[in-house]
Image (spheres, rainbow, N blue to C red):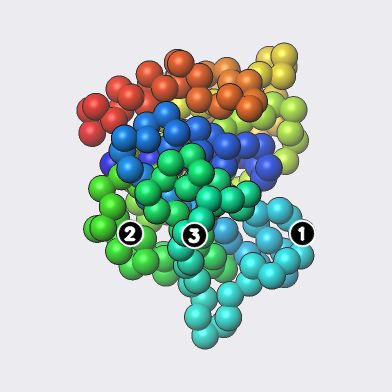
């Protein structure tokens, strides 16, 4: 079972959503993967210059977290994941990550991935996209894969119209929508939707 959690922008709660799913369906003994792409000295995780860049001779870096903590991969373990990984790679190089991901898939029957761009190389059993109508930023990777979403989770801020309505008008009209209120991203309705997908996979 592969679940992918994406979102239209940074820092809107994707890690919290993934951790919430791990916690809710803890019996699945998840392996969790956080994918960070970098380029031009700017981190895809925060938008700021950082040390996420990999070495040119080793463009794909993947590390396993072993202790629960405050990092994203540590939060996955704290939520109940059996294993947790952080993968770093240059932007636009997702195809090169296939081998590393396949090794994780072979050893772990249930994997949850926080990423949009991973959809370039796989078709998950469930793809949930988190939306914040008050956030104007919209990543290109999100726009590319919106039509692949199985459901949209919209952060409830009392806004009925997104700031970027014209950018993605109509894309989600025929897809399930769930309002969620941080810090509780996995509502009863979201849990039931994912549970039905897990049962049918």
Q: Residues within 10 Å of mark 2 (few under 14, many from 20)?
A: some
Q: Which residue is the site of mark 3? A: 65
Q: Which mark is residue 48?
A: 1
Residue 151, how many percent across, how many down? 45, 26
Mark 3 Cα shell of 10 Å, populated few (<14), some (14-19), many (≥20): some
Please name the residue that numbered disc 2 is placed on. Answer: 104
- List the single residue furthest toward the bottom: 57
Coordinates of residue 43 in the picture (x, y in percent): 68, 61
Side of 164 relative to 74 (left or right): right
Residue mark closest to the camera, 2 vs 3: 3
Q: Quadrant of the N terminus?
A: top left
Q: What element does badge 3 sit on?
A: strand
Assess disc 1: are there few (<14), some (14-19) or many (≥20) residues with their C-alpha within 10 Å of its C-alpha. Answer: few
Q: Secondary structure at mark 2?
A: helix
- Residue plotted at (26% across, 48% down): 109
Q: Are marks 3 and 1 in contact (CB under 8 Å)?
A: no
Please provide percent x and percent y for residue 24.
Answer: 42, 29
Label 1, secondary structure: give it.
loop
- Provide residue 96's location: percent of width, then percent of height: 42, 69
**Residues under labels 2 and 1: Cα distance?**
29 Å
- Position of 161 relative to 148 (above/below): above
Which residue is at 45% across, 21% downward? 190
As measured in the structure, the alpha-carbon distance from the residue carrying label 2 to the one carrying label 3 is 14 Å
Q: Earlier in the sequence, mark 3 or mark 1?
A: 1
């Amino acid at each position: 079972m592969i679940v992918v959690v994406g979102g239209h922008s940074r820092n809107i709660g994707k890690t919290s959503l993934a951790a919430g799913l791990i916690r809710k369906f803890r019996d699945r003994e998840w392996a969790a993967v956080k994918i960070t792409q970098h380029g031009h000295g700017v981190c895809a995780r925060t938008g700021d210059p950082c040390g996420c860049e990999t070495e040119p001779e080793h463009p794909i870096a993947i590390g396993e977290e072993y202790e629960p903590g405050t990092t994203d991969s540590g939060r996955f373990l704290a939520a109940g994941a059996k294993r947790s990984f952080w993968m770093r790679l240059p932007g636009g190089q997702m195809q090169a990550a296939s081998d590393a991901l396949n090794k994780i898939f072979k050893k772990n029957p249930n994997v949850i991935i926080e990423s949009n761009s991973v959809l370039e190389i796989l078709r998950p059993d469930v793809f949930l996209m988190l939306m914040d109508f008050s956030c104007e930023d919209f990543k290109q990777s999100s726009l590319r894969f919106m039509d692949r979403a199985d459901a949209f989770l919209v952060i409830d801020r009392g806004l009925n119209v997104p700031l970027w309505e014209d950018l993605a008008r109509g894309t989600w009209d025929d897809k399930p929508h769930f309002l969620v209120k941080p810090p509780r991203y996995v509502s009863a309705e979201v849990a039931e939707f994912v549970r039905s997908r897990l049962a049918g996979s």
